[in-house]
Amino acid sequence: MGLKLCYSNYDLECGTDEAGRGCLAGPVTAAALILPKTFHNNILNDSKQLSEKKRLLLQPIIESEAIAFAVEHIFESEIDTINILNASIKAMHHSIMSLSTTPNYIIVDGNKFKPLKSIPYKTIVKGDSKYLSIAGASVLAKTYRDIYMDKIHDEFPMYNWKQNKGYPTKEHREAIKKHGITKYHRKSFRLLPEQYRLDI
């Protein structure tokens, strides 16, 4: 069964999603997307179900066909200050407010959100596998965040962010154990398992 185009009857329904919530390094990135009622795509699905090749193929299609889209990062220091849940919601708020067209309804991936202005909204668990605008937002958030992680990889290649994108892989944790942390690591996260001692 394909993804649905809309949840509400509003004409400017915006889907929003984030990427990088569980990472040890780098920003949490959110995208907001308003698609036209005529939008159709057979490949688009939750970004976690798509290969990097497919996401990169979809990105320009989504951007060119969208009524409006925006992508915003919230960086490590702010994540450490306000916590990852608040940072994720803030990134989504920023991306929605950056849209060139103001939506009149918002559908959000997950079960947590905070009111934005007076725009009605609905949180939808696994929304990125149910609605095209959330799936499209998940693709944009993931591709833009990956591009950012590839860029900072060049500064600290020993963590292999080009490959792991900041997620807590065994290799990433081994590199933290060996080299310590960088300015891009989230200090409020458990960067190493309990058996390792890390001086921050």
Image (cartoon, rainbow, N blue to C red):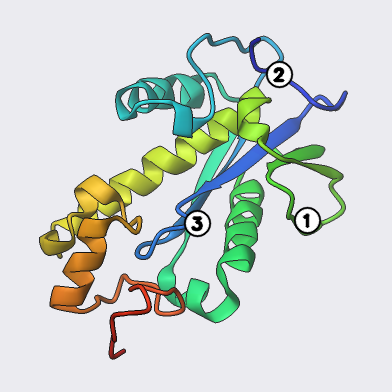
- Is 198 situated above or below 132? below
In this rendered view, identify the residue nearer to me: 23 or 63. Answer: 23
Q: What element carries label 2?
A: loop
Q: In this view, does 102 lie to the left or right of 24?
A: right
- The mark lying in front, picked from 3 and 1, is 3
Residue for point 33% across, 73% down: 192
Disc 2 marks a residue whose amino acid type is: Leu
Q: Which of marks 2 and 1 is in front?
A: 2
Label 3 neighbour load within 10 Å: few <14, some 14-19, many 20+: some
Label 2 belongs to which residue?
5
Give the side of residue 66 with respect to residue 149, left or right.
Answer: right
Q: Name the residue under label 1.
A: 116
Q: Mark 3 points at which residue?
A: 21
Q: Nearer the viewer, mark 2 or mark 3?
A: 3
The residue shown at (65%, 17%) is 3
Amino acid type for the residue under numbered disc 1: Leu
Residue 179 position, x and y percent, is: 14, 76
For the residue pair 192 and 141, the one nearer the viewer reads as 192
